[in-house]
Image (spheres, rainbow, N blue to C red):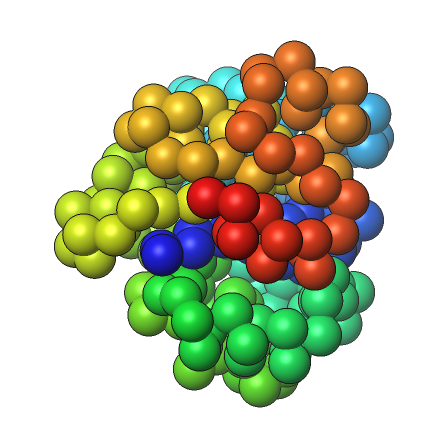
């Protein structure tokens, strides 16, 4: 079985960090957006979120804010996130299944965190925001499915994750992270869980 995981909000508790990092990056360039304004933009890559908030005209400024988000994640944000499971749990999954990871975050901060937690070696493939396919969840999942030729389960914490899985006819597991249980239920995932350690039981049912 191919198990694909989203990163922010799914594999790690990171909502508070993401809000803080984006707010600080905007503040450096004299934009004082509050968390209530920033939070609805989560889901697409950060470049899209920035464009939604300040417009698309000033490409240099967009790039500068995006770079600052990446810098803050590596310098400060990585200290603010935590795994939603024990490394041993992922180790056991990796013994029986192929694990792949997709993230809207940058590759550098993602890999740094995975290495710090001693779980980097569990992943057969990692697609990050700067990769060619990285900005489109559906394309990333389709790519995983094509290269590994395995039935796939995708675990995500946002409605867009579930919709991407449904688009390629993959099994979807929703977990509360960035979005509420009510929001996740509205798109009818195959399974809805509270904790990642519920996954093995689901896999036995498939």
Q: Quadrant of residue 166?
A: top left
Q: Quadrant of residue 33?
A: top right
Is residue 88 visible from the viewing direction of this image?
A: yes
Is residue 62 visible from the viewing direction of this image?
A: no
Question: Residue at point 57% right, 72% down?
Answer: 90
Left or right of residue 152: residue 105: right
Residue 28: percent from left, percent from top: 70, 48
Left or right of residue 3: residue 158: right
Question: Residue at point 70% right, 60% down?
Answer: 197
Residue 147: percent from left, percent from top: 16, 55
Viewer-proximal residue among 166 and 75: 166
Relative height, residue 9 to residue 173 (above, below): below
Relative height, residue 87 to residue 152 (above, below): below
Q: Quadrant of residue 118?
A: bottom right
Quadrant location, the N terminus:
bottom left
Question: Residue at point 32% right, 42% down?
Answer: 141
């Amino acid at each position: 079985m191919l198990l694909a995981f989203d990163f922010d909000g799914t594999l790690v508790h990171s909502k508070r960090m993401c809000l803080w990092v984006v707010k600080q990056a905007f503040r450096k360039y004299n934009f004082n957006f509050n968390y209530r304004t920033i939070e609805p933009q989560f889901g697409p890559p950060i470049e899209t979120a920035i464009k939604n908030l300040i417009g698309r005209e000033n490409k240099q400024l967009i790039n500068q804010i995006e770079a600052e988000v990446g810098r803050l994640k590596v310098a400060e944000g990585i200290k603010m996130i935590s795994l939603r499971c024990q490394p041993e749990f992922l180790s056991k999954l990796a013994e029986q299944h192929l694990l792949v990871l997709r993230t809207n975050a940058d590759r550098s901060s993602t890999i740094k965190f995975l290495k710090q937690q001693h779980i980097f070696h569990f992943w057969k493939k990692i697609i990050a925001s700067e990769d060619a396919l990285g900005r489109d969840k559906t394309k990333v999942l389709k790519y995983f499915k094509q290269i590994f030729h395995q039935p796939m389960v995708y675990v995500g914490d946002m409605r867009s994750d579930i919709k991407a899985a449904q688009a390629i006819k993959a099994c979807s597991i929703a977990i509360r992270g960035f979005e509420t249980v009510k929001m996740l239920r509205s798109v009818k995932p195959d399974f809805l869980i509270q904790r990642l350690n519920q996954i093995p039981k689901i896999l036995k049912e498939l």
